[in-house]
Image (cartoon, grey):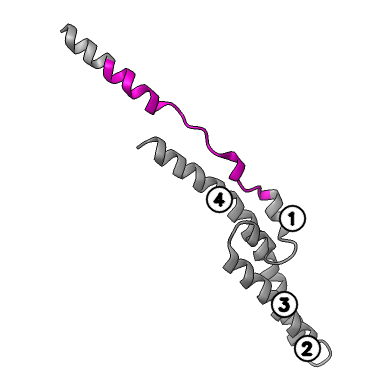
Amino acid sequence: MNIQIKTVMLIVLLAFPFAAEKKMNTSQEKNALTALKLSIVPGLGQFYNKKYLKGTLFLSSEVYLLSLVKHYYNIDINKRNLYMWISLLVYTVNIIDAYIDSELDTFTNLEEYENRSNF
C-alpha cells in the first residue's frame, strides 16, 4: 500500500510541469484595428494579415473596376453605375475580410495553443 501511494505521488509530481499553462507568444498577434485601418486602401489589410494572394486580388479588382468606371463615365451611365456599385461591394468585402482575418488569426493561435497543451 505504501509503495502504491508513493507511485501515485511520483506520477502526479512528474505530470505537474506538463499541466502548467504555457504563455502564448503575444508579440505575433495581429491587431484587428490596424488591419481595419490598412484596408482603407484595397488589399493592404490582407497584406498585413500575410494573405498576399487575396490582397493582390482585391487591389487588382478595384483598379480594374475603377478603370471601367472611368471608361464608361461619359459613354454609358448605366454601366458606369453598375461598375461603381460592384466596386463599392468589393471594397466593403475587402474591409470586412481584413478585419475578420485578423480576428481569426488570433483564434487560430489559441486553437493551436490549446491543442499543444492538451497533448
* Dot 4: element: helix
Q: Nearer the viewer, residue 102 or 90?
A: 102
Q: x%, y% of residue 68?
A: 73, 85
> 10 Å neighbourhood of mark 1: few (<14), some, or many (≥20)?
some
Q: Are marks 3 and 2 in contact (CB under 8 Å)?
A: no
Of the residues shown, which amino acid type is indicated by label 4?
Asp
Q: Which residue is mark 3?
A: 63
> 10 Å neighbourhood of mark 3: few (<14), some, or many (≥20)?
some
The tag earlier along the polypeptide, 1 or 3, is 1
Q: Residue furthest bottom?
A: 75
Residue at 72% x, 58% y is: 38
Q: Which residue is mark 4?
A: 105
Mark 2–mark 4 distance (CA, rounded to whole Å): 39 Å
Q: Nearer the viewer, mark 2 or mark 1?
A: 1
Q: From which residue to which does the magenta span run?
A: 10-32
Quadrant holding the C terminus: top left
Q: x%, y% of residue 85?
A: 72, 75
Quadrant holding the N terminus: top left
Q: x%, y% of residue 48?
A: 65, 57
- For residue 5, side relative to residue 93 (left or right): left
| Tag shown at residue 71 | 2
| Tag shown at residue 37 | 1
> 10 Å neighbourhood of mark 2: few (<14), some, or many (≥20)?
few
Q: Are marks 4 and 3 in contact (CB under 8 Å)?
A: no
